[in-house]
Amino acid sequence: MTSQTDYSEKPNGTGIKRIIKAAYCSFKGFRAAYEHEAAFRQELVMCVILTPFSFFLANSMTQLMVLLMTLAFVLFAEIINSAIEALADKITLEHDELIGRAKDLGSAGVFIAFTLLVFCWGLAIIERFFY
């Protein structure tokens, strides 16, 4: 006989309690990224500097959203990469092929986010100043 899991008794609660707890955990994650990850702090400074420029640079609301989303995507990728690295370092600090691969994959994700940012911002700059 199989037992069913009672999802109404989840440790994070349900309804509005779950939403509040999730928001609190997210805030803790942002704080941890800021306190422990130099790359996140650098990218956050970049986002703070570039955000006002996006309003000047964008030729449309759609382009503005693309510019802002590329900034958010870099922060997102860095947070995911930092989470992977934290978990990997918790497992072992010694060289391990699979852990090294996981860290490299996380870094590749950040690289993709930056490449997208450079491409989108570069096109916006070309469109704004050369067309």
Image (cartoon, rainbow, N blue to C red):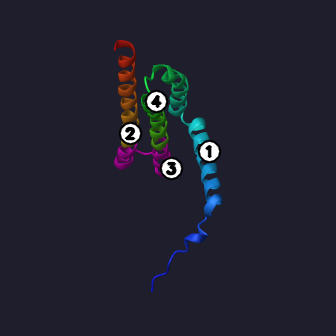
- Contact? badges 3 and 4 (CB < 8 Å): no
Upstream in sequence: badge 2 or badge 4: 4
In this orientation, which residue lies closer to the viewer: 3 or 98?
Answer: 3
- Contact? badges 3 and 2 (CB < 8 Å): no
- Asked if the magenta segment contains residue 94, the reply would be yes
Image disc number at residue 61: 4
**Residue 69 picture location, percent across and down:** 46, 35
SS at mark 4?
Answer: helix
Q: CA distance from mark 2 to mark 4?
A: 27 Å
The label nearer to you, 2 versus 4, is 4
**Residue 50 picture location, percent across and down:** 50, 23
Q: Which residue is label 3 attached to?
A: 90
**Residue kind at label 2, given as amino acid type:** Gly
Circle 3 packing at 10 Å, graded few (<14), some (14-19), many (20+), is: few
Q: Which residue is label 2 attached to?
A: 109
Upstream in sequence: badge 3 or badge 4: 4
**Residue kind at label 1, given as amino acid type:** Phe
Q: State whether residue 23 is above or below residue 12.
A: above
Horizontal side of 82 relative to 114 (left or right) equals right
Kindly tell me whether residue 116 is visible in this rendering.
yes
- Asked if the magenta segment contains residue 32, the reply would be no
SS at mark 3?
Answer: helix
Q: Which residue is label 1 attached to?
A: 27
Main SS of the magenta segment?
helix
